[in-house]
Each structure stands twice: as C-alpha cells, then as structure tokens.
Amino acid sequence: MSSLATPVAATSLAQQFCNVRRQSELLCAPLTPEDMMVQSCAEASPAKWHLAHTTWFFETFILRELDPGYRPFHPDFLWLFNSYYNSVSDQPEKKLRASFSRPGLQEIQAYREYVEKALHKWLKAGAPDEVERRAVMGMHHEQQHQELLLTDIKHALWTNPLRPAYLGLPFENLNAAAVQMEWREYAGGLADIGHTGDGFCFDNELPRHRVYLEPFELASRLVTCAEYLAFVEDGGYRRSELWLSEGWQAVQTEGWRAPLYWHQDKASGEWSAFTLRGEVPLSDLAQTAVCHVSYFEADAFARWAQKRLATEAEWEFAASDARVGGNLLEDGVLHTSVASGYGVQQMFGDAWEWTASAYLGYPGFHALPGALGEYNGKFMSNQMVLRGGSCVTPRTHIRATYRNFFSPATRWQFSGIRLAK
C-alpha cells in the first residue's frame, strides 16, 4: 500500500497541505478515467467529483474569500462543484454528478494544480492565522473525501458485473483466530467529553461538557463475520421482534438478508464477500470484523445477542485514554482485520462503530459563522453517531472525540458493531 499512501506528518503546514493533496491523487492511481465517472448509489459520488470538490473547498473558503488578488480557475466551478452549501450558491442535484463528463479529468487535474499552487505559495510565505485555520480544516475535509472516495469506488466496482478489484493483491494474516470477546468494566460517574481545545476539531465536537454515566461494560473487540453469520443463520433477518419498526421496514422493502457485499451461492450455499481486493470466500474473512451493516442491523444483532450498543458518551469515555492506532488507511489492508492482543482492541480503525446516540448538538453548541457553519450543524436530524474510524480512515484524521454520522439505514460505509451491556 506504500504506493497508495503518503505520510501527512510534516514540518510545515505547507508541506502537510501538499501531502494531503498527493494522498488523494495516489488513491486514484489504480483507477481508470472510466472508473472515476461512476456513481453507483445515492450516497456515493464519482472519484473525479471528489478531486474537484475538495479543490473547490480550498478555492471557495480561502482563496476567493481571503485573497483579493486571486482569480478563479473557472467561473462555473463555484456552483458546479458545490455540494450542499446553500449560502454559497445553487448546486446540481447530487444524483447527477455521474453526468459530469465535462470538465474532463485533465481539466480537473489542472484545476487542482492551479488552486494548490496559489494556496501553497501563500502558506509557504507565511499566511494569516485565519488562512491557516481554514487550510487545516480544508485538509481534514479532503481526508474525509479520501475515505469516501474508497468507500464509493468499492460500491462502484461491486455493481460492475465483472466485480473487478481496486487493488489486485491477496489478503495476508487472515488465518489467525480473533481473540475471545471479553468485557471491560467501567465504573461510570461524572465524565467530561468533547474536544479539549488542543489541535484541530470540527465544530460538532464542541463544547466540552460533563455527562453522567451509569456503570457499564464494553466488549473488548468488534463483532466478527463468523459471529454475525450465526445471527443470519438463526433467522435474524426473518425475526421481526429483533428489529426497530423502521429497520424491519427496510429489511422488507430492500430485501436485506445479510450485510452489504455478502453473497450466498445458490448451488453450494457458501458465502462470499466483495472487498476492495475483489471477491473473497467469507470463510477466509470469518475472523475479521463484520462491516457494511446499518444501524438497524447493528441494533438487531445486539438485541439477538442480548446486549446493546454503547452510547457515544460511553464510547468516548472508554477511548479517551487509548492511543490512536490500529488498522487505518496507511496500513494498506483496506478491509477489517483480525483482533489480536490483550485489552480493548479495535477502538480506532477497522470499522466505524454504530452507537445508540442520535446525532445532536452538544449543550451550548454553536455552528461556525458564515457558510462554513453548514458543514455539520444542519445535519443534526435523523442521523446516528458512529465512532472510531475505519480501515480507510487516514491516521492523522481520527481522534477520540470525532463524531461521524449517517442515517440509520446506511450500509455502504465501513461500519461495524461493538457490543455493550
């Protein structure tokens, strides 16, 4: 994976900026221009669009607003590559992004180079504090899209009847058995959660505040594919009593019978799973953490196991003293791994962990002023919180206070299950 990942840590902000930009381009290296046009589901965007939109963010919120001498690359790009910032401009419907055959890939690459050159020159010369603050936010925004790019291309390749692999290399170290699931006890009581103010955070991680936690226990690792298969084989998708009402409706209307990307051969009954390395027998992945399950599936599995999902406050309290490490993008696995070692495992990386918490603002939350305030706050409705990052999350992007969020039926993300009780 070394050819697909570049270290982000650097001595200067200008170099960090260049490293993040290179990372996006390296992730596109295995793709053809045709691959980069595909938009295979409502949640996804074409890879070419990700390259353009992340550039749009730097141009719109830094160069256009703060550099009086900057001349935009193209007048139509302001609205063409706007995602959802209504106070900036109108924007095309998301589902139409795959129709953007023009501008072509070469022009998008030229756009990236144009914006990058202008901002890099400013950062290298010593930019004002507000420019640097927005540049850091833009880098984290691009890292989010690096994860989305891989998530989206996985779905795109899966919808191709040929089921091509993004990375044509076999998995390694899948033969080990996952460590036994154990339970870590937490005494509860008063706890402080939310960002401490050191380093970057998004506005939805603030303000830091105090919560009360009842005593609880957390599983030492994520649920494996083998454990989830037992739920499937026990009729988990046929037992309405295990499901929330909306989840049961999704099972019926969408025809869910297993996690996304799982397939059962009609003749043999054997299961397989599609990965970024191609189709793999599920028996080879049995000890890896299950992923691509919705909140509804995670909740139903927990109920079947006579456990529950952790709240986001419980999760953050448990993760607050854990080192950020594990199976992340730079490790190059591009899929969940087998839990090994002692203590609580897989808190960071492998799969985003669904929590039992709705995505809401913390007490005293205030969105950023201006258009950047649309980044997080306006989505605080009908979403559930996930924590911990995944196998395609950049290492320098994740932290214990990071709050991801998706609608509860979402399955295309690398999302998994940690039990609590």
Image (tube, rainbow, N blue to C red):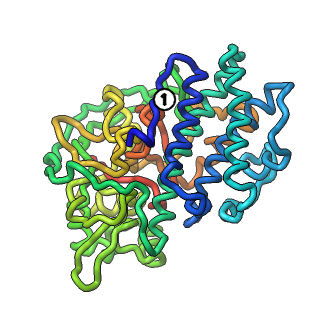
Q: Is residue 237 above or below residue 84?
A: below
Question: Looking at the picture, how far across and down is residue 2, in whole percent?
Answer: 39, 39
Residue visible at 44% across and 38% down in the picture: 5
Q: Quadrant of residue 226?
A: bottom left
Residue visible at 55% across and 58% down in the picture: 32
Residue visible at 76% across and 37% down in the picture: 60
Question: Looking at the picture, how far across and down is residue 77, in whole percent?
Answer: 78, 48
Left or right, 333 with respect to 145, comes to left
Q: Nearer the viewer, residue 337 or 295?
A: 337
Q: Nearer the viewer, residue 80 or 241?
A: 80
Q: Quadrant of residue 129?
A: top right
Left or right, 85 with respect to 320, comes to right
Residue 388 visible here:
no
Q: Quadrant of residue 42?
A: bottom right
Q: Point out the residue furthest to the bottom here.
A: 267
Question: Looking at the picture, how far across and down is residue 38, in whole percent?
Answer: 59, 63
Say which element carries label 1: loop
Q: Callout 1: 10 Å neighbours few (<14), some, many (20+)?
A: many
Residue marked by disc 1? 8
Left or right, 74 with respect to 259, comes to right
Residue 256 visible here:
yes
Q: Nearer the viewer, residue 29 or 398?
A: 29
Quadrant for the N terminus, please. Answer: top left
Question: Looking at the picture, how far across and down is residue 141, in whole percent?
Answer: 59, 38
Residue visible at 44% across and 35% down in the picture: 398
Badge 1 amino acid: Val
